[in-house]
Amino acid sequence: MSTIQEIESAVEQLPQKELTKFRDWFSAFDAAAWDRQFEADANAGRLDALADEALRDLREGRCKDL
């Protein structure tokens, strides 16, 4: 399978039990990929401005306790 269309077609043909297994696998796969990207962004400093803004808001009393 080398194209999105082929993958979509294969997924559409899965029996319910296999679709459930695929969904669970893909959810874990996608979460791990997101975690790796988030970590890479954090390590590269791409989130520093957001963290600075959040800390500034906290210091200046613009945050509420939940």
Image: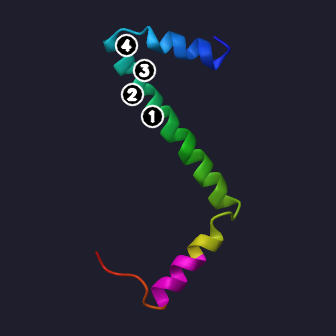
Callout 1: SS: helix
Residue at screen point 59% across, 78% down: 52
Q: Which residues are magenta?
A: 52-59
User: Residue extending furthest right?
Assistant: 44
How many residues crowd mark 1 within 10 Å: few (<14), some (14–19), many (20+)? few
Identified by mark 4, the residue type is Glu
Q: Which residue is mark 3?
A: 22
Residue mark closest to the camera, 1 vs 4: 4
Decide whether the magenta segment is chiefly helix, strand or loop.
helix
Residue at screen point 64% across, 73% down: 49
Circles 1 and 4: CB atoms closer than 8 Å: no
Distance, label 1 to label 2, CA atoms, is 6 Å
Q: Which residue is mark 2?
A: 24
The mark found on residue 18 in the picture is: 4
- Along the line of sight, the residue nearer the viewer: 4 or 18: 4
In this picture, residue 13 sits left or right of residue 8: left
Distance, label 2 to label 4, CA atoms, is 10 Å
